[in-house]
Image (spheres, helix red, strand yellow):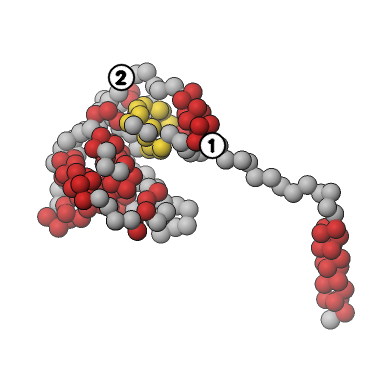
Amino acid sequence: MPYIAVGLFAVVLVVAWLVARRDVPKPQSKPALTMEQARAYNARIPFVTDRMQPAEPFRFHGTPAAREQAVQCLATAALYEAGSDPRAQQAVIQVVLNRVRLAQYPHTVCGVVYQGSALQTGCQFSFTCDGSQTRRPERQGWEAARLAAKRALAGRVFRPVGRATHYHADWMVPYWIGSLDKIAQIRTHIFYRPKGAGKRG
């Protein structure tokens, strides 16, 4: 017991000394970029110049119930990630389907859309973990998203984003952009593919 008391007393002295040291600089976090700075940074990253390879048509094989679930997941992602813009919605849908084909992602549409959503910092699509789904979607945008999802599951390809697997809004600078090829921009969203993906037939 005396040793414990002496140890606790020493800890208290150290803490008191640190508090008294007002000249010790506190760690500073790196300031976040403003929207204008982020956009300028993103604009300096060049697009790859090789011929973009389009994705293969996606053919959904499953029960009617499974198809409806896939449509729901795709449409939800398209609407909350891209709003009511039809081209941006199609681009988001294409990214989801491109991921379904790759081994490092879940092999179902809903699995890809909601990957990591139960983790505090692990969601792949921000709308699944930032509270966006509490907003009621606009009816017109929702119907357009469902139609685009159905068409994509029936084989329609949105060629402008090729084999993109990632995207972000142009006012953000994600940590991963240096490891991917920048290939397209649709409105305010910038799209990326794995490096060298355009070289595959």
Q: Is residue 176 visible?
A: no
* Outermost left residue: 64
Whole-percent x, y for residue 72 in the image: 22, 53
Q: Alpha-carbon distance for marks 2 and 1?
A: 33 Å
Q: Disc 2 or disc 1, which is closer to the eye?
A: 1
Residue pointed to by mark 2: 51
Dot label at residue 34: 1
Disc 1 residue type? Thr
Determine which quarter of the picture holds residue 29: top right
Mark 1 residue element: loop
Can you tell which mark lies on residue 86?
A: none
Image quarter in which the C terminus is found? top left
| Position of the N terminus by quadrant | bottom right
Q: Residue at x 38, y 38 (%)?
A: 166
Q: What residue is rendered at 39% in x and 21% in y?
A: 48
Count of numbered circles on the image: 2
* Amino acid type, mark 2: Arg
**Where residue 51 sits in the image (x, y, percent)?**
30, 19
Element carrying mark 2:
loop
The image position of residue 77, as x and y in percent, is: 30, 48
- Decide if residue 182 is on the left or right side of residue 175: left
Where residue 92 sits: x, y (%)? 30, 40
